[in-house]
Amino acid sequence: MKIGELSRATGTNIETIRYYERIGLLPAPGRTAANYRSYGDAHRSRLSFVRHSRDLGFTIEEIRSLLDLSDDPTRECDEADRIATRHLEQVEEKIAQLSLLRDELARIIGRCRGGIAADCRVIEALSDHSHCENAH
Amino acid sequence: MKIGELSRATGTNIETIRYYERIGLLPAPGRTAANYRSYGDAHRSRLSFVRHSRDLGFTIEEIRSLLDLSDDPTRECDEADRIATRHLEQVEEKIAQLSLLRDELARIIGRCRGGIAADCRVIEALSDHSHCENAH
DNA sequence: ATGCACCCTGTAGCAACTACAGGGTCAAGC
DNA sequence: GCTTGACCCTGTAGTTGCTACAGGGTGCAT
Ligand SMILES: [Zn+2]
Ligand SMILES: [Zn+2]
Ligand SMILES: [Zn+2]
Ligand SMILES: [Zn+2]
């Protein structure tokens, strides 16, 4: 499989695949006589793992740890579960933050009655957090 | 006011203040004889506006437009409201995305029963999106 | 032989900071 | 008068996770 085919098979940009190789997330594949990268099934499933983990919001470093773990199937899985749990906590925290933001933005926008900038409650609200009702 | 004082007054990193000046978001202040930046109240309130807008998640470019608007108080405020409304929509979209993510992560983590990596449902789930129940 | 799709390397750009390195300034204390 | 320490300056490079060239080579069909 050449890189374009791997790209289509996994929905990953070609430049991204080369980037993952460069940072050591994917092993360097063999090369054809023309110096083209040549991938097998192992590469494809490793890349799928990476892409799916990225889609779930894991960082590259977290994925590196998760890959190490899946490369050594005799190890205990608790590190994987710890990484995933911490990530879930971060996602929940982010949702909570964004919800505060959303509420505050909705409140600010709701106060605009049109007119000139000097009288706009949106502009006014932005200039000072003390007009806010939550901590966002 | 020297930069350190402005930094404390607005809760902004000194390097960030200089960065905002470099990209033209804050006007270059006057200088003392020793070539130290010297700020006044106008600078402080402009920086507060920027920080608060950043805290609410607006991009630098959005803030540039909002500042232009508040610099010209006779203009209609509808652009400010449009920017804020679009931003609110983006925040809501992000919350929806993260909620899908959270549900999927919680489901994945809930399936782990401990043991070795070869049997771990977390590792398995990461390797293939077709095990997922939503689109995240 | 010429077009076209595909591949290669290496570098630079994005957002929004943050972190130095390597230097200058200024007031206080001994 | 000299050192210590807190502060300030410029300029550059790093962060995360890609993405976009520039400038070239390869392979196959017409
Ligand atoms: Zn308005
Ligand atoms: Zn606020
Ligand atoms: Zn497990
Ligand atoms: Zn999935």
Image: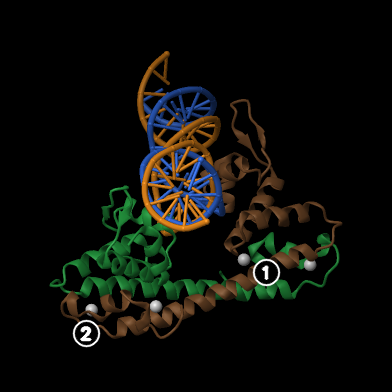
Chain colours: A green, B brown, C blue, D orange
Q: Nearer the viewer, residue A71 or D20?
A: D20
Residue indicated by mark 2: B113
Residue indicated by mark 1: B86
Could you tell me which residue is drawn at 31 percent across and 67 percent down? A44
Secondary structure of the residue carrying numbered label 2: loop
Secondary structure of the residue carrying numbered label 1: helix
Could you tell me which residue is drawn at 32 percent across and 60 percent down? A61
State which quadrant residue A136 falls in: bottom right
Query: Is ligand 1 closer than 8 angstroms to the Cβ of mark 1?
Result: no
Left or right of A39? Residue B37 is: right
- Mark 1 residue type: Arg
Task: Count every numbered label the image shows and give the total.
Answer: 2
Which quadrant is home to the N terminus of chain B? top right
Q: Nearer the viewer, residue A134 or C16?
A: C16
User: Tag 2: Cα neighbours inside 10 Å, few (<14), some, or many (≥20)?
Assistant: some
Query: Is ligand 3 closer than 8 angstroms to the Cβ of mark 2?
Result: yes
**Residue A19 visible at all:** no
Q: Do marks 1 and 2 share a chain?
A: yes
Q: Position of residue B32 (x, y in %)?
A: 63, 29
- Mark 2 residue type: Arg
Q: Nearer the viewer, residue A31 or A108?
A: A31
Could you tell me which residue is drawn at 32 percent across and 47 percent down? A34
